[in-house]
Amino acid sequence: MSIKEIVYRSLMTFFILVTCITAGIMILGLAFDPDARFGYDVLASPFIFAILGVIPNLLMYSRNELSNKQIILRKIIQFAVIEIEVVSVGVISPEIHTEKAKVVTGIIVSVFVIFILANFISIINSYFSAKQLTKELMQFQKNIK
Amino acid sequence: MIINISHIKKDEKERLEIYCHEVNNEITEIVRFVKSRQGQLTGIIEGAQYEIPVSDVFYIEGVDNKVFIYCEEQVYETRQKLYELEETLKEKHFLRVSKSVLLNLMKIESIKSSLNGRFTAVLQNGEQIIISRKYVPELKKALKGGNL
């Protein structure tokens, strides 16, 4: 993937992540700390976590075309890096009670779910693009014949 | 080499004649170029040369400085370069879909999504060819009737 493609895909991923992280924070908050009240500054956290989630996209950069095996391997590394990033931010942040095992487990599971969800949305998007391309191809071949 | 172009009457058949001392690589190259413009490619299998109609070609691939022509069942080697073929086969609905592959758009059965935003072309003989993201805008343009 070229740098231009990385930037384009990262932007798409960023907006998908902001949505998924907002939903994730809501679900985790309601599960572990339903009485907590926050200021407006909390609205920044989905953006910050989304940026953290997007940075490892750079791992997908390659001058050469990656094989499917290489893509899967890099995706696994990307997922591990995101987990480390998010858990580290959780440990640093005084508002997140990472001393409780269930909170850490909740964060890890949330990151996993959001990672899967973001990739799934991307796959669905590609599926419909491919369907549209096939439709245009059929029309093209019909016009030539 | 002297190049002589003469205008002929509309009812006469256009022809190309080459007068040479010997049929060397240069002459062979010129003949190959003219043939490919006319919808014929020259392929080689075990030293024997074959004339291949362009419409029978599924895709052309460059591998380690060699170029191969893939038909439904046969694979031929060609001495032409991939970029030369790309240029001459533009009007025959061939499109570069990756660094090393020229694909005949008329031989694609469907396009499916692949990992990491790439696409795969499923050909009429069941073979699958990866379409790099870099070449997808060109493909879209071609399918919408743009110039190949």
Image (spheres, helix red, strand yellow):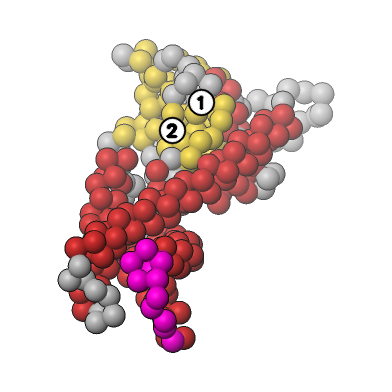
Label 1 crowd (10 A; few <14 / some 14-19 / many >=20): many
Q: For this rendering, which residue is in front, A48 or A142?
A: A48
Q: Quadrant of residue B36?
A: top right
- The disc placed on residue B75 is none
The x, y position of residue B62, in whole percent, is 36, 35
- Can you tell which quarter of the image residue B76 is in? top left
Residue behind mark 1: B123
| A32 vs A76, nearest the viewer | A32
Residue A7 is a magenta residue: no
Judge whether B37 appears above or below A7 on screen.
above
The chain letter for the residue carrying disc 2 is: B
What residue is pinned by disc 2? Answer: B129
In front here: B120 or A51? A51
Q: Determine the chain carrying the residue at label 1.
A: B
Contact between labelled residues 2 and 1, with CB atoms less than 8 Å apart: yes
**B75 relative to A67 in the view: left or right:** right
